[in-house]
Structures are given as structure tokens and as C-alpha cells.
Image: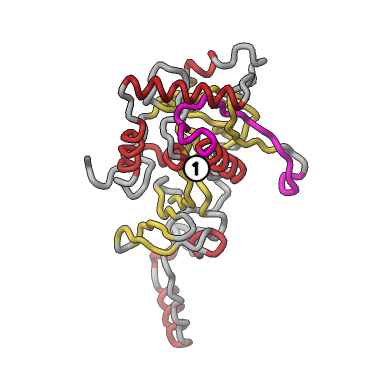
Amino acid sequence: MLKGLAITPPILGRISIGKIVEKNGKRLPEKDDQFTITSQVQGKEGWLLHPLNEELRQGKDDKLRSIPVRLLFNEPELNFRADYTLFDRQSGRPVCVGNGETCKRVTQDGMQSLPCPSPDACPLAKGNACKPYGRLNVTIGDEDPLGSFVFRTTGFNSIRTLAARLHYFQAISGNRLACLPLELRLRGKSTRQSHGTPIFYVDLTVRSGMEMAEALVTATELDSRRQAAGFNQAALDDAARRGFSNGAFEDSEEDTSAIAEEFHTEGETELNTPVPQTTPAKPSLAAKLDAQAARQHSPTDQDQGGRHAPAQAESQ
């Protein structure tokens, strides 16, 4: 196994509740009130739709608000990883990833492990630069039991709800989380911050039309069949755990630019790693007079018409 490279579940496609649109020449994320399932291929108009996107819409009035899924692992944190993440806006790469206690941060001296005070108390997180960032892997259908679709989110409601559901389902199923018949479901709510406009988040429930007791019986039966066939779920969880820990950051370089574009708008603070700046000493009066005299006699400060060329505006 290559050291420094996180080994993550094989990805067949993406699940999102939004898209990237162009407005006034800028590419901006736009939220939606339904799920969209895409492939991993991106065209001029955005991500190409996965065949499951249309297949699952049948009978749903063209609004895909629930997706039948299963999970790959019994351990909640392997199915859903959530961190505080600071992205570099220029490269799209993560700069700092932490859990509120410790973090891994790219510095001028290389990768370092440092305390993580959470975004509210971190000087690097000013301007909403650092966000909670979650990744959920699920399987859809039975064609590829180890191939997954990934749902990425920086939404607090989705992260909190998914984390709670996964731990609850693991507890009541007797650690048979990977065998439960589940469903991703889109829910809406209004908050004071949304000014009455509904915001949508992702929940995880047992499948529609199925009671909890029926789902638990189904999970127990599937677990028994898998064990009889030699399916070693504990070994699979252990392999995934070692794969995730093999790299400093989970997302690959080819994915990070699209991730940063999806979750950070053009109007937000640039997410470059802040470099401490020193305050220059104020020039003396003599130095100012010398500089003024030099400008008056220098031809490089004038344009062809003999007028002084305007100074270039300082970048913001």
C-alpha cells in the first residue's frame, strides 16, 4: 500500500442536492429541493447524470427526494467521515483538517499535527474559511456491493442528522449497520437565519413502507446469509479503517478543485493559507523626499504621452 495515499471506497457516482450554475460569468453553487445522482464524468454543462438518476425518478413526479441505499460498513465513522476542513481556494486542496481537538495542517515546514480549537476559535478560520465537511458512502442496488456513491456536504443539519442516525442504527441492530435496508431522505426546515425560506438537508431512515422491526429482521437474515457465504464484515471494516488512515487527507487532488467550487462561492474569502505579515517600519522624512525626487527624474514612471502612468490597484 502506497504510504501517504488514502485508500477510499471505490466511487461509482455522486449524490448531491445542488449544482453549479453560471451567473454573470461566475460559477456559483445553487441549492436544490431534490437529489441528483451523477456519474464521475463532467461535461461542458456539468456532471453527466447517472442512469440511476432517471430510473429512481419513476413514479416520483420527477422529484427525487428519497433513495434506497445500504451501507458498506458496520462502523458509523467509516461510512460517514466529518471534519472541520479549510480548503485552499486557488488549488482546491485541503490545507487543514481537524476534529475540534487535533488537526493535520500543511505549513511551510510540511505536514504538522497541531491542536484544533474548532472554527469559532481558530485564527485561520476567519471569514467562514473553515467549514464542517462530511462524506457519506452508500451503495445503490445490488450490482456492485463494494462500489459506492458519495454524498458530500458542508451542511450542519445533514452532518448532525446523519451522524446521529448511523450511531442509533448501529446500536439497535446489534452492529449490523451494513445489513440494514435504509433510505436517504430529503427533509426541509426553516430557521431564523433562512428568513422563512425552507432549507433542505439529508436524513437516513429505514426504507419507505417498512417498519423498524421488519428492517431489523431483514438485517439479521442478511447477516446470517453473508456469514454462511464467508463474507467477513469485520475484516472489511478493518481494511477500510487502515485505508482511510493511510493518507493525511481523504480527497484526491483530482477531486479537490470540484469540491472547493461546489462548497465555496466566488464572493467568499479566499481560502489560501494565511502567512503572518510583518508591519514595515514607517519611512523617514528624508527617505520620502529622496523617493519623490527619484520619481520625478525617472522615465519609467511615465507613459508615452508624458503623463505619469496610474499606479496599479493593490490586490484585495
Left or right: residue 209 versus residue 263 is right
Q: Which residue is mark 1?
A: 134
Tell me, yes or no, whether the highlighted magenta stretch contains residue 178: yes
Residue visible at 49% across and 52% down in the picture: 84
Name the residue type under label 1.
Answer: Gly
At horizontal 44% and vertical 26% (from top left) the residue drawn is 13
Number of marks drawn: 1
Front-most of 9 and 154? 9
Q: Is residue 309 above or below residue 72?
A: below
x then y, percent, for residue 103: 41, 58
Up-down: is 285 above or below 90? below
Image coordinates for residue 176, horizontal then vertical, percent: 46, 32
Image quarter for residue 276? bottom left
Q: How is the image coloured?
A: secondary structure
| Residue 19, horizontal then vertical, whole percent | 56, 31
Name the residue rendered at 57%, 32% in the picture: 204
Frontmost residue, 142 versus 53: 142
Residue 230 in the figure: left or right of residue 21: left
As drawn, the residue found furthest toward the right would be 196
- SS for callout 1: strand
Q: Position of residue 16 (x, y in %)?
A: 54, 31
Considering depth in this image, is 304 or 38 the residue closer to the camera?
Answer: 38
**Up/down of 39 relative to 199, above or below:** above
Image: magenta residue range = 171-195
Residue neighbourhood size for the residue with mark 1, other residues' Cα within 10 Å, grouped as few (<14), some (14–19), many (≥20): many
304 or 294: nearer the viewer? 294
Report the quarter where the N terminus lies: top left
> From this viewpoint, is residue 144 visible?
yes
Asked if residue 245 lies in the magenta stretch, the reply is: no
